[in-house]
Image (tube, rainbow, N blue to C red):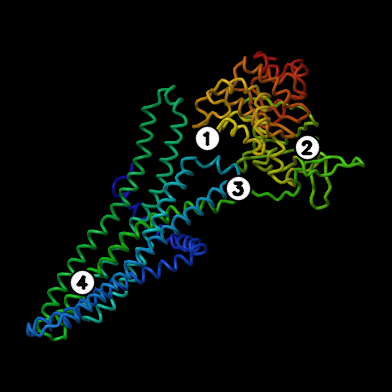
Amino acid sequence: MPGPRGNAGRNAAAAKDYLKMGHPWRTFTRLMGDLFSHYGVQYALIMACILATVFANVRGNLFIQRLIDDYIMPLVHANPAERDFGPLLGAILGLAGLYAVGVAATAVQSVLMAFVTQGFMRRLRNRMFGHMQKLPLGYSDTNSRGDVMSLYTNDIDTLRQMVSQSIPQILTSVLQLAMVLVSMIYLSVPLTGVMLVIAAVMVLLTKVLTGRSGAHFSQQQKSVGKLNGFVEEMMSGQKVVKVFTHEEAAKRDFREVNEKLYDASNKANKFAGYLGPINNQLGYIGYVMCALIGGALAMTGATGLTLGALVSFLTFVKSFTMPISQVSQQLNSIVMALAGAERVFALLDERPEGDDGRVTLVNVTRDDSGRTVESQERTDDWGWKDPSDGHITPMRGDIRLDHVNFSYVKGKEVLHDMTMFAKPGQKIALVGSTGAGKTTITNLITRFYDIDSGSITYDGIDIRNMRKGDLRRSLGMVLQDTHLFSGSIMDNIRFGRLDATDEEVKAAARLANADTFIAKLPDGYETQLAADGAALSQGQRQLLAIARAAVADPPALILDEATSSIDTRTESLVQHGMDELMKGRTTFVIAHRLSTIRNADCIMVIESGRIIERGTHDELIALKGRYYTLYTGLKG
């Protein structure tokens, strides 16, 4: 294990690398470009309000000199009987009017800033979620849900703080700094020189400490994502954790992940925490030095510094050091926000799932001459339409794989020279050991992944020429791992076809034999589900997934262990509904429970990405090969 010095060296190097990368500035300009492209007018008004507020405050402070030198001191030295307070009252009323303008500008700024911030965050979240829907399945397979969730929560919140607080505060501070500096030079050049030396030290320290904290803030954001992912994983697998009494190990693993987050956060905020106290103390030192030197100059009158000018200058000293402290504090927030923005933009920059297909799925009917033509109404017949020539190929469900090779990771082939076909209306069963490549075949047919070589055709059309949405719409799927959404049972079944009527939903439930248990629920089809339908048994959830596929009424089906979670008694009820659902449809069935596929038209036995046997149930049993072994548990 590396010692403390080794860790410190790595942390310092990480901070330097972070500053050298150039990503923060590019990320910032991109973020601001997005912001101004939609809210440029509002942000310009916000900047105008900031300018008005700062001007009012600076002008008010500068007025102190005239208040003392031109109004108060003459009144002090004047004969009491001859004192006229009218000019003083008028000046004070004018100052009050100036401050009123500043207050109004601040109020307008607050309202506009709330509108811009919330609107920008809404647009950004919509962009993120919309883009995520376009990403290939591989993105979900390689990124934990907790890490993705942290983009929408923690990272977005840091951006909200940056847009609504940090940037306006920095704009305010920079404007205030510039106006105050001009005012201070006007009041006293020597005293301004003293404060510029103090300011130079503050800027140098700010740069050093911000650089140190930057790398740790970036690591903090990543660690938050990992922590969220771990918690989400443990929550979803809590039953497994308890069954295997893994609680202590889970706590130990959590402490390790949490320790990394603590380490990054502690170091980031430690360096950031130094800035405020150090800059404040330097500000106090500057104030004391200016008071001493300014007092001496005012008493001697060598530089023409008056009492009013000194009081006004000392007021500006606080206004001069405070912006530097505020900028240093907000810079840390910006660094942390930019670390989150880089993660958000990394998501938005993920390459969306390509779709260069042109052939679409349409409802068809026959005209008077018997030709297949497109129908604008829903029919029971489907066809593939090529927009280039308008030709429609009747959908029959003929799916063929011809010498297909595929690898998830380049160089590690999963399917080898796979050739198989399903004739229209056939029920094709895929069996084999876990990891043999059965689910991979269905992933390729649906184009969740694209093949390396070979071809897959659907009714004689290469599926790469089909629009992915239309291809997938033609392939109803029931997966082993069901997923139910928050909402009613009716809505969850209707997810298969959003325009389905209530009666069509109930008919689909009856087809899947889900209607029986739904009727026994307190609110029937309006029963609300939450937490992925945790209140239902695994078998009931599977029945709803089958009903969802039934209401979609797809031309072809893929059933991936669709009855694996259903008990034997329920299976007999479901099988009839499944048979009705599969009638007239080309169906691919993946099953470990081989009793459910005895009536398949063709059974493919797959091992290590190759088809080693094919035939009907009786033919394969007679062969006494791998299928015989799987079915009987005996060696052939």
Cα gap from disc 3 to disc 4, whole angstroms? 57 Å
Residue 156 to residue 518: above or below: below
In the rendered image, which residue does mark 2 sit on?
Answer: 379
Cα gap from disc 1 to disc 3, whole angstroms? 22 Å
How far across and how far down the image is residue 460, in percent?
A: 81, 40
Reading the chain from its start, which is encountered first: label 4 or label 2? 4
Q: Secondary structure at mark 4?
A: helix
Q: From the viewer's perspective, is 584 left or right of 215?
A: right
Amino acid type, mark 2: Thr
In the rendered image, which residue does mark 4 sit on?
Answer: 315
Question: Who's the residue at 28% across and 75% down the image?
Answer: 59
Q: From the viewer's perspective, is 496 left or right of 144?
A: right
Amino acid type, mark 1: Ser
In the rendered image, which residue does mark 3 sit on?
Answer: 134
Residue 451 to residue 167: above or below: above
Tell me the tag on residue 89: none
Q: Secondary structure at mark 1?
A: loop
Reading the chain from its start, which is encountered first: label 1 or label 3? 3
Amino acid type, mark 3: Lys
How far across and how far down the image is residue 539, in percent?
A: 58, 22
Cα gap from disc 1 to disc 2, whole angstroms? 31 Å
Cα gap from disc 4 to disc 1, whole angstroms? 59 Å
Cα gap from disc 2 to disc 3, whole angstroms? 29 Å
